[in-house]
Amino acid sequence: MDRRSFLATAATAGVVASSAGAAATAPGLTKPPLLRPPMVRAGDKVGVLDLSTAVYDPAVADRVTAVIQALGLVPVLSPHLLDRSRAFKTSVQERLSDLHGFIADPSVRGVFCARGGYGVSEIVDRVDYDLIRRNPKVFLGFSDPTLMHLAIARRAGLVTFHGRMPGLMKFTPFSLEALRRAVCAAEPVGTLPSPEDGNPLRPAYPLRTVAPGQASGRLVGGNLSMIMAAMGTPWEIDTKGAIFLFEDVDEAPYAIARMLWTLRHAGKLQAAAGIVVGACAGCDKSSDASPYGLNEVFDLVLGDLGIPVFSGLALGHTDDTLTVPLGVQARLDATARTLTVLESGVAG
């Protein structure tokens, strides 16, 4: 699809979105049944867009192209990926146009966010979730796009993928294989591995049991700060009976504690069947605000919930990143420190 055709398709989708945003915030809506997107296959087109912090570095296009082609797929860069307006209202419309255009385009089989940052909060209430449910496609992202994961789950019932984004500076072979297994294969990804480490005595991603035990449930979660940003909104996280995953980056332990206490006060932690804490990069910094380190925070807030909890999985803002299908069933063994995805996130 050329640029002119893409924009025409996106404009049509945008008309639908003008009323869909209001519908998405209407009270009393029930969560739709779970829907899996079709698997992406060799030679399929994948649309890459930016819903968050604007990208102006042309090298991002090269990084995106390298990752998508390494998967055997064909990258399609959105019209505004590197050419977004700095005017707020125009920027919002450009991002919605790129997203709706890819969703409505039958030749595009997946939609990957190029990066995170900030910005999804500006558009989440204007997205056409009915359009997404009518045209299910793989949606990939983490960090700021966590808000899209939550909203899509609530409004479209679609399985989405929490994983590394192709425009980021680092993209390791581990991250590439994790992404391939999640979106390019019909089989469940199974037990999620830890990256190989040259020093087993001091692993880069140490796993730790916070509370022993086993549990099963659907996978929910993402970036902790964005989960907090959704509280009180129509896309607030639903943790009832779920395996709750979370991670964050560059937050002091007391800030992590405050967010977790808020979720506990709201009953979100107690409602979960189990919890997996991702490796929180840059979060174990000392602070005068609280005497507790990061692991102490996890023990204090999560250790007595009466559910299994373990920490350290390579999720989110880590050089090596797992891709996890959100919405499917998984089994957590906090004693053995394993998370096993039992169902495929894609339809074969």
Image (cartoon, rainbow, N blue to C red):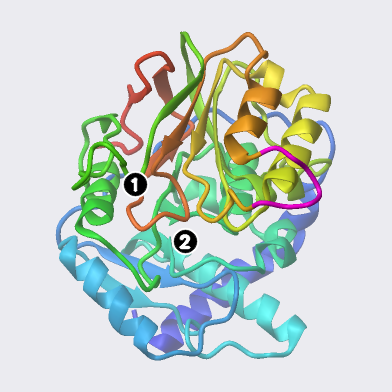
Q: From the image, which quarter does the N terminus lie in?
A: bottom left
Q: Classify residue 12 as left or right of residue 89.
A: left
Give percent across and percent down for residue 160.
46, 44
Residue 190 image point, x, y percent: 26, 27
> Seen in the image, is 62 located left or right of residue 268?
left
**Residue 317 x %, y %:** 47, 55
Position of 171 relative to 347 (above/below) = below
Residue 111 magenta-drawn?
no
Pick the front one: 48 or 35:
48
Q: Which callout, 2 or 1, points at the residue further toward the start of the chain?
A: 2
Q: Residue at x 20, y 64 (%)?
A: 73
Please tell me whether residue 35 is drawn above or below residue 184 in the rendered image: above
Residue 55 vs 69, above or below: the answer is below
Mark 1 = which residue? 204
Return the residue at label 2: 103
Which-is-in-front pick, marks 2 and 1?
1
Residue found 23% across the figure and 37% down from its top: 200
Asked where in the image residue 324 lies, by quadrant, the reply is: top left
Image quadrant in which the C terminus is located: top left
Q: Quadrant of residue 59?
A: bottom left
Specify the segment rendered in magenta.
286-292
Secondary structure of the residue carrying tag 2 is helix
Instruction: Give the number of marks.
Output: 2
Instruction: Categorize mark 2 by other alpha carbons within 10 Å: few (<14), some (14-19), many (20+).
Output: many
Residue situated in front as seen by the camera: 138 or 192 = 192
Q: Amino acid at mark 1?
A: Ala
Q: Is residue 110 above or below residue 197?
A: below
